[in-house]
Image (tube, rainbow, N blue to C red):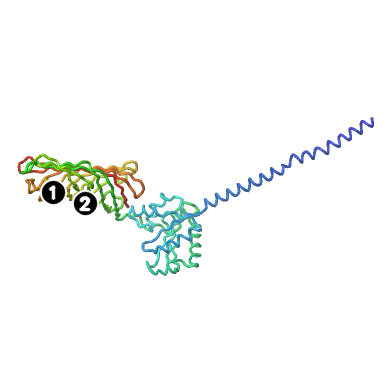
Amino acid sequence: MSRVALCLAALLTILLVARPLRAQDEAAPPSDAMETTSESASEASANTSEEASADDFPSVLVVARRDTPDTLVYDVEGFLGEACQLIDSSAYLREARDRGLPPESAEAMAEILPQLHPELDLVVVVGANRRTRASLASLHYHDRHGFQILEEEHSIRGNMLTDESRARVLAEVRLGLAVITRPRGGLSELGGGVAPAREATPGLAVHVAVQAGAGLGTRELVASTRNGAVGLETALFPSAAVQLSVDVEPVARGQLTIGADAEYLTSFALTSADRRIDGSIRETSSRSQRIGAGLRLHYRVDPSLDAVSIGVGLAWSALSFSSEAPVSLPDYTLQGPVLSLSVMIPIAARLITIVLAPEAQWIVDVGSGLAAIGVDSTGAAVGGSARVRLRVLDELFVDLAYRESHAFLGTENGQGGADVERFGSLRLVYAR
């Protein structure tokens, strides 16, 4: 019995000692797991820190006043770009110009920036006391709603800020950001700053467009003269076109636009078939040209930029034909005033624009050559043009244009004559 009791006591002692050790092993995680958990926590902390710093990185838009030296503007952008996220100002400047608003004005900021850059923190407007040999730089600080926070002046040398001025500017930027970024709604939610003095009032806006392209054309003329029937008929010939347009909006983006156009169309490598009085055909190198210039008035039927516009135009046009070698048909020019009506149809937020413009011309002169063989000096023409414009970039477009006109000429024998012109071209347009 004593032996049995001793065995039971030894077994009980072993169990009591082993149980706490086992509990400790289960409670303590493996050393590898602890290291993995620590690394994961460090990575998560680093990622959170990076995301937070990216979110808190202030965004700043630098705008230059008129006549501010470029060197000064580049200098301000340069050192602010090291501490802030600089926003490209080109889209804002273009939008302000289209609306006829000074980009540095609080009115322009209030009208444009909340929609264009809704997360923008600070606007810095840079100016100088004079264009050349400036000694002082003026900096105005605004939030994106146009509220002014600070207005300070700084010493400059060689159109660049001094080291002391740079330190002061950075301190001013920090002050401005501390005020307007909490809350992100801007000063309007805090009741601070200087609000825009008045509502934005768009002014005059001027747009200039230059276009050039190439295409194809044809010309035909048949006339019954005192010398018999004369005429010409061209094969399809290559052509070139250039045009300059200026549009003035008395109120930027208003419904009324006053425009002026100057256009030149010409053939090259043109060979015409001259139908002689005896019925024979002779080919010769020739040139067909059209020069036109005029004024037009467009009215958009609704204030929306996507609305249809109607227009009326008055121009002077000269359509000529000449040959390098003497032929039975003399060189001539049909010229006179042109009255046109037009409709402009924007599609898909002005990605595509269609313009249709029928026209009528009173021909007041046909040239001395045709008059000498019995063609009346006056006549009439009807025709028109069609254009499809595709926007490629904000200031770059591609136009597919076609025009056609039919001129009706009187003659001494009463049988009359006709001139038919057709031009089609593909053009590249730069407009701003």
Residue 349: x and y, percent? Answer: 34, 43
123 above or below 19? below
Residue 66: x and y, percent? Answer: 36, 62
Q: Distance from label 1 to label 2 (Cα)?
A: 37 Å
Pick the residue in front: 245 or 318: 318
5 above or below 187? above
- Residue 413 appearing in the image: yes
Which residue is drawn at the image coordinates 39% and 57% (left, top)? 106
Residue 328: x and y, percent? Answer: 11, 45
> Tag on residue 326?
1
Which residue is drawn at the image coordinates 44% and 56% (left, top)? 61
Pick the residue in front: 46 or 308: 46
- Residue 419 appearing in the image: no
- In the current view of this chain or complex, which residue is farthest to the top? 1
Which secondary structure lies at badge 2? strand
Question: Which quarter of the picture shows residue 375?
Answer: top left
Q: How many marks?
A: 2
Residue 26: x and y, percent? Answer: 74, 39
Which secondary structure lies at badge 1? loop
**133 on left or right of 340:** right
- In the current view of this chain or complex, which residue is farthest to the right? 2
> Tag on residue 295?
2
Amino acid at pointer 1 = Pro
Q: Are marks 1 and 2 in contact (CB under 8 Å)?
A: no
Which residue is drawn at the image coordinates 37% and 66% (left, top)? 131
Which mark lies nearer to you, 1 or 2? 1
